[in-house]
Amino acid sequence: MRRRVFSMAAVSSMECVKSVKGVILDMCGVLYDSGEGGGHPIHGSVQAVKRLMDSGLIVRFCTNETQNTREKFVQKLQRMGFDINVSHVFSPAPALIHILRERGLKPHLLVHDDLLPEFDAVDGSSANCVVIGDAAENFSYHNLNEAFRVLIGLEKPLLFSLGRGRYYKETDGLKLDVGVFMKALEYACDIEAEVVGKPAPGFFQSVLSDMKLQPHEVVMIGDDLVNDVGGAQFCGMKGVQVRTGKFRPSDDNHPHVKADACADNLAAAVDAILTQRSVNN
Ligand SMILES: *[C@@H]1O[C@H](CO)[C@@H](O)[C@H](O)[C@H]1NC(C)=O
Ligand SMILES: *[C@@H]1O[C@H](CO)[C@@H](O)[C@H](O)[C@H]1NC(C)=O
Ligand SMILES: *[C@@H]1O[C@H](CO)[C@@H](O)[C@H](O)[C@H]1NC(C)=O
Ligand SMILES: [Mg+2]
């Protein structure tokens, strides 16, 4: 039998995923690379996702995408060849809507226009909190000031942020991310925002509860050592890092986060997990 294994550490720790019943996949940098025309699939990932789903493992997807609805985002991946069901994709906006419902909150929204449909069913009249996402061009002085006025007018200002990134890269250069504008509102109102999305434990827990699995039964595969791997490990899951996307060799010497295993790419990680499974079954 051909053994395609990555490193000694990977082999030994993959042995401890023998009881694994589910896999959570990060999307950008694992399934595809973003770029011109929306991006392209990473070599072998389309097939790897299919094999994982055919194996009987419970598979969910987890992204921090907040510029688009899940439907649009999933359509983009389907065009790349991925067979993905929208209901299996977890992104910050639906997780936040769940929180708003649970706590009976009505949001004032400062988000990208393309994300607004996610909030169609949410009552935004007489807002008692503010939600900020990556609004890009819609981060105007006017819109930020409106959000500020709503916040400062509340007895107890409550701000939710869809992620807390500083900046990200697009084909035409670096862009300020939502965290920068979140900080501005925090500063103005002397408050601290509640961040929804990776690596917030509540975000991962909402995925686990949908999978109906315990954390130790699930492995998270991501390219982001801190947010994917570290975030999952904090919740009691195993974390596997792939050497694609934003992976950097210096990740291997990170002072706080150590992946349970590493793989060259998703295809190699799936090979290892399925091999482990067949050994144990
Ligand atoms: C997507 O998943 C949901 C819930 O698991 C299921 O009801 C639905 O039929 C699925 N849709 C497709 C196209 O597979
Ligand atoms: C958001 O930006 C777009 C493009 O600049 C603009 O057409 C739209 O009116 C803006 N929406 C809001 C709510 O500011
Ligand atoms: C989302 O993920 C992308 C790609 O992994 C990253 O560049 C960006 O900073 C992240 N954004 C947030 C808000 O976490
Ligand atoms: Mg990623």
Image (cartoon, rainbow, N blue to C red):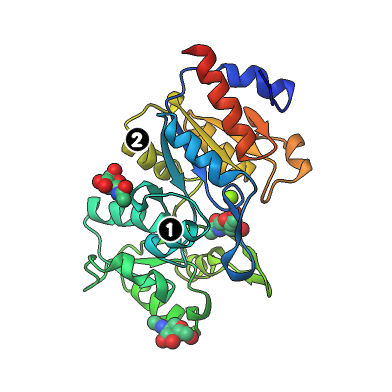
* Label 1 beta carbon within 8 A of ligand 1: no
Q: Which residue is mark 2?
A: 211
Looking at the rendered image, the quarter that the N terminus falls into is top right
Q: Which mark is residue 74?
A: 1
Rendered position, 262 above or below 80: above
Query: Hey, what amino acid is under mark 1?
Result: Val
User: Nearer the viewer's eye, disc 1 or disc 2?
Assistant: 1
Q: Which mark is residue 216?
A: none
Residue farthest toward the front in the current orientation of the protein: 1
Q: Quadrant of residue 56?
A: top left
Q: Residues within 10 Å of mark 2 (few under 14, many from 20)?
A: some
Q: Amino acid at mark 2?
A: Met
Location of residue 29 with respect to 233 vertically, above or below: below
Q: Residue at x 60, y 21 (%)?
A: 14
209 relative to 52 in the view: left or right: left
Judge the density around disc 1: few (<14), some (14-19), many (≥20) Cα neighbours within 10 Å: some
Between 152 and 267, the residue placed more toward the observer is 267
Indicate the secondary structure of the residue bearing disc 1. helix
Where's residue 31, x and y in %? 56, 49
Residue 74: image x %, image y %? 43, 58
Q: SS of the residue at dot 2?
A: helix
Viewer-side residue, 137 vs 100: 137
Label 1 – label 2 distance at C-alpha: 19 Å
Q: Position of residue 136 (x, y in %)?
A: 52, 75
Horizontal and vertical percent position of residue 261: 64, 28
Name the one closer to the observer, 32 or 43: 43
Which of the marked residues, 1 or 2, is nearer the chain's N terminus? 1
